[in-house]
Amino acid sequence: METLGEDLLLLAIRPNGTLGVAQKLRFGLSGSELVRLAAARRVDIERGRIVVLDTAPTGDPLLDAALQSMQGGRRPPAAKAWVARQRPGLVERYLDRLAAAGAIRSERRKALGFIPATRWLVLDTARLADVRSRLDAIASGSPGPGSPSLSSAQAAFAGLADAIGLAALLYPGFAAAAARKRLKNAAKLDRSAEDVTSAAMDASVRAATDAAVAASIDAATQAAVSAATEAAHHAASHAGSHGGATGGHH
C-alpha cells in the first residue's frame, strides 16, 4: 500500500522511455494518496466527501502535502473534486522520488531530431518485475497462494490501474479481454474473507478505494472530453481561417 502511487507510475513507463496514459497519471496518483490516507486512518469518506480524522504528519512528504490540501475549506472536499484537482508537478514529484531511490533515471533526448524530450529508463528491473507480477496475478485471477479473495491493497491497485488506462496499455488486444475485465471488477469484489478484526479499517479503505476509482474514471473521462472538444474547436477555427483566406479565389 505504501508504494501504490509509485507502482502505478513504474507500470506507466513504456519500453521507449515515454510515459503511457500520461494525461491520466495524476488522477491515479491522487487516488492512491486518498486510499493510503484512509488506510492510515488519517481520512474517511462520508457521503462522498473526504473527512480529515488526523492532521499529524505521516512521515511521507508527498502524503503530508496531500493531507494538507484536503483541509481549510468551508466544508470537506468531495472525493471526486479532490482527485480531479490540478496539483502542478505531482507526477514530476513521484518521478523524482523513484529517481532518488535509484529505480529510474531521466535522459534528455531530441524527438524527431530537434524537439527536446525526457525519457525515463527503468534501472531497478527487479522492482518493476515484482510490481508487474502482482498486477498479473490479479489479472489472471490468482491473487496469491492461499488467498481466497483480494485484499484491499490489491483491489485499490487493480482498480486504479484500470481507471487510468493501464489495463488497456498492459493487456491489449482481444486475447487479454478477460484480464482487463478482472482488473475492472477487482475493486468491486467482496472481500468478506479478510480478517474480521480489520473490518472497520477495511470499510474505510474500501470506501476510499471506491471513491478514488470512481473519481479517477470521471476525471480522466472529463479530461478526455475537454481535450477532444478543444481539439475540435481548434480544427474548426483553423479551417475557418483557412477558408476565409482562400475563399475569394476561384
Image: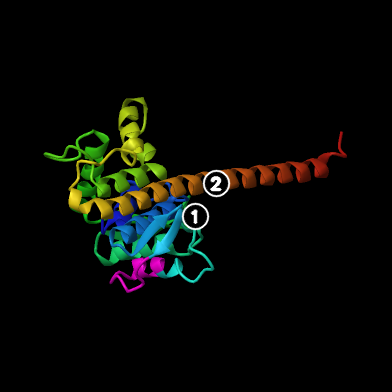
Q: Nearer the viewer, residue 179 or 35?
A: 35
Instruction: Please give the name of the residue rendered at 31% of the width and 48% of the height, measured from the top-left corner.
Output: 156
Q: Is residue 19 visible?
A: no
Q: Quadrant of the N terminus?
A: bottom left
Q: Which colouring convention does the figure follow? A: rainbow
Q: Is residue 21 above or below residue 65?
A: above
Instruction: Please give the name of the residue rendered at 24% of the width and 33% of the height, measured from the top-left corner.
Output: 140
At mark 2, the secondary structure is helix
Instruction: Please give the name of the residue rendered at 25% of the width and 39% of the height, measured from the top-left corner.
Output: 138
* Proximity of marks 2 and 1: CB atoms separated by less than 8 Å: yes
Q: Quadrant of the C terminus?
A: top right
Marker disc for residue 222: 2
Q: Is residue 173 magenta?
A: no
Q: How many marks overall?
A: 2
Toward which corner of the image does residue 144 lie, by quadrant?
Answer: top left
Query: Quick one: which residue is furthest to the left in this view?
Result: 146
Instruction: Please give the name of the residue rendered at 27% of the width and 51% of the height, measured from the top-left corner.
Output: 202
* Range of residues picked out in magenta: 53-67
Mark 1: few/some/many CA within 10 Å (<14, 14-19, 20+) = many
Q: Nearer the viewer, residue 225 or 55?
A: 55
How far across and down, in percent of the image, does residue 131 sit?
A: 23, 48
Amino acid of disc 2:
Gln
Pick whichever of labels 2 and 1 is earlier in the sequence.
1
How far across and down, in percent of the image, does residue 242 sit?
A: 76, 43
Query: Quick one: which residue is furthest to the bottom in this view?
Result: 56
At mark 1, the secondary structure is helix
Which residue does the numbered mark 1 point to in the structure image?
84
